[in-house]
């Protein structure tokens, strides 16, 4: 999956001269926390809810309520926006976009293609996609297997057992553990009772360390 498969294409944008209160009103109305700032169709910055919240108190310090509102009404998006927002390509894998966000401390990026703004992607978009991949919210059981990586064909063995029990796989992930030099597998199955499956996995030597209770829809 790439950024283009996750990004929001119907954009809400503002111009640099937009009053910040108007930008904040747009965020509330459209339930977004980021607004690309465009001028003559060109991306020139990014206005975010966090920038508004960070700057407003410092600008208003020492003023009365009326003076504060007057000051803020006079401020424009151009005074607060991030003038050099980090952008991503629509062809970037979504997990790379998530990692980039963690590195940069960003929760979203404008998506640029051939110099044009084509969308915006946020951590919320990516998390919703991950939830679908993980099968969260669907009825099922999660099984944790530790100590993988010492035998060839282990994943095939696991899948063979699941297939024998006709257990639909909602998700199957593995993660390396450097401290133990092995792998841990997290498997979510669309089953109500995994007792027989766990027994078969254990009988062939798999270390099943956790079995959740069925999660209702």
Image: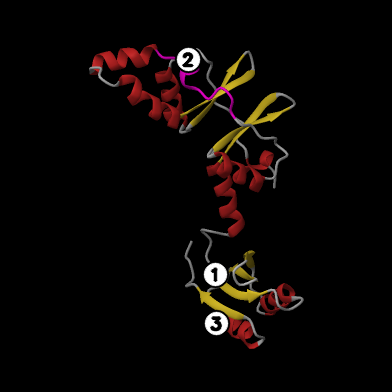
Instruction: Say which element carries label 3.
Output: helix
User: What residue does disc 2 label?
Assistant: 18
Q: CA distance from mark 2 to mark 3?
A: 61 Å
Residue at x 54% of width, y 43% of height = 123
Q: Tally the marks.
A: 3
Residue 116 appears in view: yes
Instruction: Check disc 1 and report its element: helix, strand or loop.
Output: strand
**Which residue range is magenta in the image?**
75-85
**Mark 1 vs 3: CB contact within 8 A:** no
- Kindly identify the residue that appears in the image at 71 percent across and 72 percent down: 155
**Residue 153 drawn above or below residue 124:** below
Depth-wise, is mark 2 or mark 1 nearer the camera?
A: 2
Residue at which label 1 appears: 142
Closer to the camera, 11 or 154? 154
Give the mark nearer the N terminus: 2 vs 3: 2
Dot placed on the residue nearer the N-terminal end, 1 or 3 = 1
In the rendered view, does 65 fall on the left or right side of 113? left
Furthest residue in direction right, as rendered: 152
Label placed on residue 167: none
Could you say which quadrant of the image residue 85 lies in?
top right
Determine which residue is flagged by label 3: 195
Q: Residues within 10 Å of mark 3 (few under 14, many from 20)?
A: few
How far across and down, in percent of the image, does residue 161 sit?
Answer: 68, 79
> Is-magenta flag for residue 94?
no
Q: CA distance from mark 1 to mark 3?
A: 12 Å
Residue 36 x/y as whole percent:
56, 25
């Amino acid at each position: 999956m790439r950024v283009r498969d996750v990004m929001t294409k119907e954009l809400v944008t503002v111009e640099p001269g937009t009053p910040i209160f108007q930008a904040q009103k747009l965020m509330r109305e459209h339930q977004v926390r980021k607004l690309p700032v465009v001028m003559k169709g060109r991306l020139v910055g990014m206005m975010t809810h966090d920038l508004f919240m960070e700057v407003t108190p410092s600008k208003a310090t020492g003023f009365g309520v009326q003076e504060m509102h007057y000051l803020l009404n006079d401020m424009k998006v151009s005074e607060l926006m991030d003038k050099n927002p980090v952008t991503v390509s629509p062809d970037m894998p979504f997990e790379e976009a998530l990692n980039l966000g963690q590195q940069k401390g960003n929760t979203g990026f404008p998506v640029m293609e051939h110099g044009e703004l084509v969308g915006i992607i946020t951590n919320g978009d990516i998390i919703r996609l991950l939830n679908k991949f993980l099968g969260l919210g669907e009825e099922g059981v999660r099984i944790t297997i530790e100590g993988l990586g010492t035998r060839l064909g282990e994943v095939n063995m696991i899948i063979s057992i699941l297939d024998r029990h006709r257990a639909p796989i909602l998700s199957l992930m593995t993660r390396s553990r450097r401290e133990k030099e092995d792998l841990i597998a997290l498997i979510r199955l669309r089953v109500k009772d995994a007792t027989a499956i766990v027994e078969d996995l254990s009988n062939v030597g798999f270390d099943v360390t956790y079995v959740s209770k069925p999660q209702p829809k």
